[in-house]
């Protein structure tokens, strides 16, 4: 019975994603020939068409990724791939932590290898074609190796801790695992800005004295204490621009892409930063962390229950181990299949994120001139080739930020 439920959910997910993507492609293509009236004075037809073509290319690639991901999932489950890996590592290492780590790591590695062609084409095909790619293949490969090493250094100790708790902490192991998971995520928030991010990019202090003074005045008005103002060499990898603040507690820092600073005026940079500070003042980060932790507790409790049910394994094409721990097997099956049953929650997360973006925009409009944020957003939409005419259903399902027209209309009304 569970096999039927799983396959039905998988088909529903794949068809829904492909249908939404097809709607996006069709809608953007239909509006390619004319710039929306409210942007006619600021966005050229050539820029609008570039954004449309870029959006269509990225969306079509995502459709192939959906199909590949579904095929891999079926291969692991119904076609016996995970069953084979499970037996292979059991025979190689015998029961124990080495077997568990090998099983989880091999599944993650296979998934990563399947994603590599899409990453390569996205970077050196689509991004290159539209003038955004600044990476060499050597830099791309170095990034992949670094990410693998960082993921191993951080992930393997966490995985060992989880497997140990699943074996030794009794029926409520999932509560202890949740506490470890929370501590791990808070640890990442602290170490990412100062230790992990610098492995991939250079972060130099902002040297523009007038801009620094303007930003420090804004932070003082907003009651925001930062570890520092930094410029990141984003142009080494991409022509896209952005700004963000990162870290937790005393480790908070504000980061500007060098591409952003080269395109926006001082007033516009201040407005963009005010928006980012709006997320801080409205406690959006804390709220998202709280929701994430609450959901993780719920999902771990569900895993704790499913791990003791034989139909959970057999329904997904795997025979549970007899007389041997099934902790690693349950962990892999759960995280492979969870997205199939939770993807319809995506619109709720997107809606919440868009609401936060509107609130951050309103905060920025209170702290700076709303017109400056509007002009900055228009430049960013143009420079990043973001479509001005997304399909309404697609954007409602996926977009973490409101579509350009909605966002700018609200800002103009606020002004």
Image: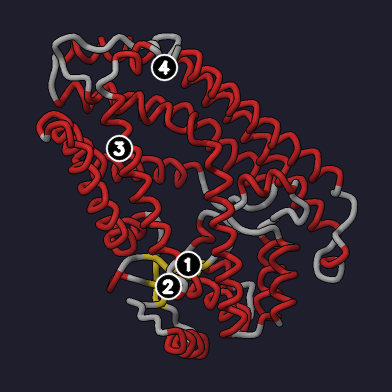
User: How many residues crowd mark 4 within 10 Å: few (<14), some (14–19), many (20+)?
Assistant: many
Q: Secondary structure at mark 4?
A: helix
User: How many residues crowd mark 1 within 10 Å: few (<14), some (14–19), many (20+)?
Assistant: some
Q: CA distance from mark 1 to mark 2?
A: 6 Å
The numbered dot on residue 300 is: 3
Q: Secondary structure at mark 2?
A: strand
331 on left or right of 210: left
Q: Residue at x 40, y 13 (%)?
A: 315
Mark before the other along the chain sequence, 1 or 2: 1
The numbered dot on residue 244 is: 1
Q: Nearer the viewer, residue 351 or 131?
A: 351
Instruction: Identify residue for label 4.
Output: 76
Please tell me whether mark 4 or mark 2 is closer to you in this view. 4
Q: CA distance from mark 3 to mark 1?
A: 31 Å
Q: CA distance from mark 3 to mark 2?
A: 34 Å
The x and y percentages for residue 171 are 16, 31
Q: CA distance from mark 3 to mark 4?
A: 22 Å
Q: Secondary structure at mark 1?
A: strand
Q: Are marks 3 and 4 in contact (CB under 8 Å)?
A: no
157 on left or right of 353: left
Q: Nearer the viewer, residue 116 or 291?
A: 291
Q: Answer above or below: position of 282 versus 270.
A: above
Q: Quadrant of residue 156?
A: top left
1 on left or right of 33: left
Q: Residue at x 82, y 66 (%)?
A: 39
Q: Nearer the viewer, residue 236 or 248?
A: 248
Q: Secondary structure at mark 3?
A: helix
Q: Residue at x 37, y 31 (%)?
A: 335
Instruction: Identify residue for label 2.
Output: 254
């Amino acid at each position: 019975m569970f096999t039927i439920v799983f396959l039905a959910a998988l088909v529903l997910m794949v068809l829904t994603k492909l249908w939404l993507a097809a709607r996006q492609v069709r809608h953007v293509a239909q509006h390619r020939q004319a710039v929306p009236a409210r942007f006619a004075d600021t966005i050229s037809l050539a820029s609008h068409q570039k954004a449309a073509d870029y959006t269509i290319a990225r969306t079509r690639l995502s459709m192939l990724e959906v199909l590949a991901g579904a095929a891999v999932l079926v291969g692991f489950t119904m076609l016996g791939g995970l069953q084979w890996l499970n037996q292979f590592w059991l025979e190689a290492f015998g029961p124990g932590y080495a077997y568990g780590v090998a099983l989880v790591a091999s599944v993650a590695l296979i998934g990563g290898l399947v994603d590599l062609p899409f990453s390569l084409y996205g970077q050196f095909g689509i991004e290159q074609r539209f003038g955004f790619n600044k990476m060499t293949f050597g830099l791309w490969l170095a990034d992949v190796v670094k990410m693998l090493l960082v993921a191993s250094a951080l992930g393997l100790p966490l995985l060992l801790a989880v497997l140990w708790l699943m074996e030794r902490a009794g029926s409520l192991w999932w509560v202890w695992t949740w506490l470890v998971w929370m501590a791990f995520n808070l640890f990442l928030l602290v170490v990412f800005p100062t230790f992990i991010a610098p492995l991939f990019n250079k972060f130099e202090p902002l040297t523009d004295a007038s801009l620094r003074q303007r930003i420090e005045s804004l932070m003082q008005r907003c009651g925001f204490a930062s570890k520092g103002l930094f410029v990141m060499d984003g142009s080494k990898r991409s022509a896209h621009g952005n700004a963000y603040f990162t870290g937790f507690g005393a480790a908070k820092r504000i980061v500007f892409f060098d591409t952003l600073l080269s395109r926006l005026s001082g007033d516009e940079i201040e407005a963009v930063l005010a928006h980012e500070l709006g997320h801080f003042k409205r406690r959006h980060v804390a709220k998202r962390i709280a929701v994430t932790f609450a959901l993780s507790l719920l999902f771990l409790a569900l895993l704790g229950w499913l791990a003791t049910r034989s139909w959970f394994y057999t329904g997904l094409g795997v025979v549970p181990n007899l007389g041997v721990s099934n902790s690693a097997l349950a962990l892999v099956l759960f995280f492979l299949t969870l997205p199939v049953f939770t993807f319809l929650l995506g619109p709720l997360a997107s809606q919440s994120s868009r609401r936060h973006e509107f609130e951050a925009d309103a905060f920025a409009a209170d702290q700076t001139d709303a017109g400056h944020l509007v002009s900055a957003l228009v430049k960013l939409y143009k420079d990043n080739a973001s479509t001005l005419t997304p399909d309404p259903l697609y954007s409602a399902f996926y977009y973490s930020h409101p579509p350009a027209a909605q966002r700018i209309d609200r800002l103009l009304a606020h002004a």
